[in-house]
Amino acid sequence: MFGYAGKILNVDLTRGVVEPLETPEKLARAFLGGRGLGAALLYQETEAGIDPLSSSNILIFMTGPATGAPLSACARWEAVTKSPLTNMYLCSSVGGFFGAELKFAGFDGIVIRGRAEKPMWLSVLDGKAELRDAGEFWGLNAEETELAIQKELKDRRASVASIGQAGENLVKFASIQVNLHSLGRGGSLGRGGMGAVMGSKQLKAIAVRGHGKVEVADDEGLMVLARELVKELKLDKWGTPWLVDEINREGLFPTRNYQQGTFEGAQRINAKTMREQLVKRDTACYACTIACGKYSVIAKGEYKGTFVDGPEYETIWSFGAQCGIDRLDAIAAANMWCDRYGLDTISAGNVIGFAMECYERGLLSKGDTHGLELKFGAHEVLLEFIRKIAFREGLGALLAEGTRTAAKKIGGGAEHFAIHVKGMELPAYDPRGAWGMALAYATACRGGCHLKAWTVGDEVITPRYDRFSTEGKAKLVIGLQNTRAVEDSLGVCALGRKAIGDEEMVRILAITTGWNFSTKELLKAGERIYNLERLLAVRDGISRKDDTLPPRLLEEALPNLKGSKIGRENFDRMLNEYYSLRGWDNDGKPTREKLEELGLLELLEG
Ligand code: SF4
């Protein structure tokens, strides 16, 4: 197989066995790699209804054919599992160097099963893999773990994916941190509790390092494309924080737990302020020329000593506007501590903002907060609440369960403003300011996620659609979802879309693997992947009742945007059209005809 290393590492923690298996070529061709291949293996190897934190769950790391190729914006890889936050299918994408190193070490992916008797870590070095005792690392944060492992391996360039205390303590939105202390770009498998799954298996970290090469089908074509991409994909000076001004100006920057759509402190936390006050250098994933990462250092003041690869737009929002905080230094410090404890910054900021609203409405008292004033704007309490969540202390133990569960337990109408879909906290775009996002959130394969179909580009940034209308949104969302499924499966970064469109992805697949797909066939693979993910969700009980939005976002208008109220009727119109175009029944289940058209069951059961 060109473009693939040809082997997947099978790790059974219960039995303490590590063995290489062949990468299944038929499945790789049908589901491309990365997210698609991971979902196919999850479907085949797990049962419906399993407890995500039990030994029956499996955690899959999977690269795509582009991962590790010397192409700009092609360093991504994917993790797939069942989420403890949503209790359904979960996929998560990250860049850095880990995916490339894994392939250079001779493996396309790692499938982790069972549960170790005691804390372990896994080393994967040039084709050799072994489980090692992690007793002395248990209790360390993710950064300390990465440094300790690199020291043990005597290799500063070993790529490490590790969990912090949040993962050990099974916080439902604990992350896996990747290349946290690298000189290049680090990242998080942030959403949905990947870190808790790893923690439940008593697996503290995986370190990879390889010096091999993945053979591709067309070496010359690869060099030609590499040069083209370098020309097209220039350094991004601002990174994702450029969105702060745009989204705030257009009035869909969720503020104080989605009570408003503009934040009066936005200028103090925008990309320009960040570049001037915090950023020391740009960071990039393997072979990427965009270098969207921004390494920030705080040298003075109460947050002195903070250094972090970030914050990105979503994190600026989650600890900024969402919590009513206009201090970039506090936001950067919150980002650093989330990375160290191993916490998803989106869910952490969302749930803290939610708790702030509960406190201001009298649903939480000072008795609940240990005397702390958990008010919007109170940056002084931010780090303490992040710590409490990571260690499940006091109110932190409740917030560690996620917004959905916390709202149920707090009661008193809190569920009305618990901002999540299927249990996953929503990110930084108020769907009332771009109705396509309402449908995108409601139908995202992993719950409340902006990355599966980011309609903001087509509705707000370069508008091609009326953003306060249902018109055309179902088709738009489906197209974006299918394309994203292809990108995530090949290992292509969505931030490279300026130069890597559908045709370039066809070229990437052909150059790396030798498989000549048409654009139509490639997007069909994207559709196949999305339907497979829906099958995984459906078998865990997801249906139309779950494809919805929190009441606040459905029933109220944004005070700053006239005509922004979506309403149930409009929402249902979009959802009905979506189901119909997808070939799903009225309850959101893929029909037999659709599954046959995509050859799905035959592939999965064959
Ligand atoms: S654009 Fe950013 S996230 Fe994407 S591959 Fe490049 S550095 Fe990594």
Image: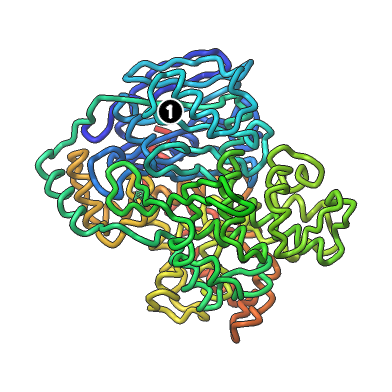
Furthest toward the front, the residue is 300
**Residue at image x 51%, y 38%?**
177
**Residue at image x 41%, y 68%?**
476
Q: Would you say 540 lies left or right of 357 here?
A: left
Across and down, in percent, residue 346 comes to 58, 54
Q: Would you say 246 lies left or right of 559 here?
A: left
Across and down, in percent, residue 270 comes to 50, 67
State the residue in front, 397 or 408.
397
Residue 442 makes an appearance in the image: no
**Residue at image x 27%, y 25%?**
211
Across and down, in percent, residue 352 comes to 70, 55
Residue 204 makes an appearance in the image: yes
State the residue in front, 123 or 409.
123
- Tell me the quarter of the picture where residue 456 sits: bottom left
Q: Residues within 10 Å of mark 1 (few under 14, many from 20)?
A: many
**Vertically, is 263 above or below 110?**
below
- Tell me the quarter of the picture where residue 589 sits: bottom right
Across and down, in percent, residue 18 comes to 45, 16
**Residue at image x 37%, y 54%?**
292
State the residue in front, 17 or 340.
340
- Position of the C terminus by quadrant: top left
Furthest toward the right, the residue is 367
State the residue in front, 486 or 410.
410
Task: Give the SS element for disc 1.
Answer: strand
Q: How is the image coloured?
A: rainbow
- Position of the N terminus by quadrant: top left
* Disc 1 residue lies near ligand 1 with CB under 8 A: no
Q: Which residue is mark 1?
A: 110
Furthest toward the bottom, the residue is 562
Amino acid type, mark 1? Ile
Q: How many marks?
A: 1
